[in-house]
Image (cartoon, rainbow, N blue to C red):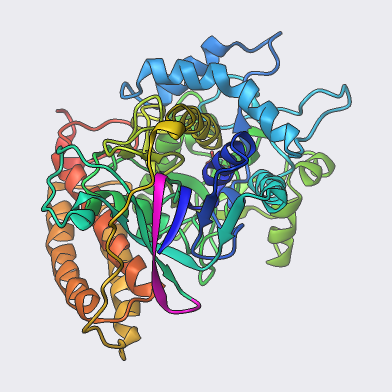
Amino acid sequence: MYKTDFLVLGSGISGLSFALKIAEKYKDATVTIVTKNEIDESNTKYAQGGIASVYNQSVDTFEQHIEDTLVAGDGLCDEKVVRMVIKDAPTRIQELIDWGTRFDTNKKGTFDLGKEGGHSQNRVLHYKDITGGEIERALIEQVKEADNINYLTYHYAIDLITEHQAQKKKTKRNSKLSCFGAYVLDAKADVVKTFVSKFTLLATGGSGQVYTTTTNPEVATGDGLGLAYRAKAEISEVEFIQFHPTALYNPGEYPAFLISEAVRGFGAKLRDFKKQKFMHRYDDREELASRDIVARAIDNELKRSGAAHVYLDCTHLDFEKFQAHFPNITEKCASLGIDIRNDFIPVVPASHYICGGVNVNKKAKTSIKNLYACGEVSRTGLHGANRLASNSLLEALVYSHRAFLNASKKYAKVNMPDNIPVWNDSGVVKNMENILITHDRAEVKTIMSNYVGIVRSDERLLRAERRLKGLYEDNKRLYDHSELSIDLCELRNLITTAYLITQFSKNRKTNCGGFYNLDLIGN
Ligand code: SIN
């Protein structure tokens, strides 16, 4: 049994920034970060483009950023949330800078602001094309210096602890529940530890691994959605999956390498398999239409032509400037023999971001007492039906701050929970057939990619639902009788997440933003 005042699940931008603030404010508090891999292994680390905010007020305004976010969200954003996040951006970004994060500047010494799809102005702060990696570096350095933050790598949260375990009560969704911590698998020691906490933050990131082609790292397995769903927290809008239009087409490479949207912001053009431009046929904003539109246009071109990929053409761009802004992308392409001065880059859409998630209010509170959520696992109302590019790191920062403010207010009033039962794993045996987990993981991805992808239909969703039910039964049998491993627990969360995306897709009755069902055209 481990007791900690604040338990943080996940080590991306949300978890780390929350932990730093709490640890700084309450020097006597214990803050524990549990993360299932190395501390820097998160979706944050792979964010290339950057973080959107209004800095050049001679041409840009908060109102324009708000409007762009609302347009991308296709009517489903919560406007109050949009206003709050966008206006809070400069203050929160300044904190990142104070923690040591670097952003590129231009010759005038002001921020070099990039442009991405759906933005009417250049407003994306970036550090070359490795912005997320730079943010993680700076935050991790700070965390390592903090005396009262304990971070545990290769620790995997299995289940949140609520009345269900604490009082052995059957709990219902919508009933008043509290969170008392989490059961956590220490994967190196092969034991399940009980972490009791006053406050728990879900900052577990995304779930791109439910699809075959994804830009998300292998850790993005929908763990937070699985945890929240089993704990009976409210979840919504998970049918809105954002497919990034331009992942590098390189069969065998997994996850897919991202060709940042900022490359299109820099002037790159899409071309079909005959090397013709096509975006003008889909949207007046062409390559800089919002992501759902560009991804669907590419999907349509691929289906019409039967080609495996389209191209991104950078040959007309100033190479020196391109290389300075996108050194990582230039190097990656060169390593595959693609000289972007002469060759087009082969690209395909790939699952990239889940817009919905665990419901939180403006204080980052979930429907479960003392459980907060922020970052990709959460649904705040900022993104609506489709996230505007580079708004996600921003949302994570603003909401981890909101969680910090609210938990601070309550800190003195909340007692450490007691009488929490430890994990019971009597009767389980070592799983001798790990290959079954590998098979099932591959099957989830195939089901989701074939039936719950960019373009869906009623029949496809029905097929996905049926097949996922079978996988759920198989996984449950294995889970109930086996010693736990990260692979097995991840599979459980992948199946739950896939099932949730499918169910929410079945329930949505009109197409909007990133959601498109052929049987709903005209509704
Ligand atoms: C990109 O660099 O294209 C990704 C940025 C984002 O997803 O917001």
Q: Quadrant of ligand 1?
A: top right
> In front: 259, or 13?
13
- What is the quadrant of residue 387 in the picture? top left
> In front: 37, or 45?
37
Q: Residue at x 28, y 57 (%)?
A: 419
Q: Residue furthest bottom?
A: 432
| 314 lies above or below 433 | above
Q: Where in the figure is residue 46, as x and y percent of width and height?
A: 59, 52
Camera sees residue 275: no
Q: Residue at x 84, y 43 (%)?
A: 320
- In the picture, measured across the screen, residue 47 lies left or right of residue 409, that is right
In magenta, the rendered stretch is 188-199
Quadrant including the N terminus: bottom left
- In the picture, measured across the screen, residue 141 lies left or right of residue 353, that is right
| 176 lies above or below 497 | above
> In front: 493, or 420?
420
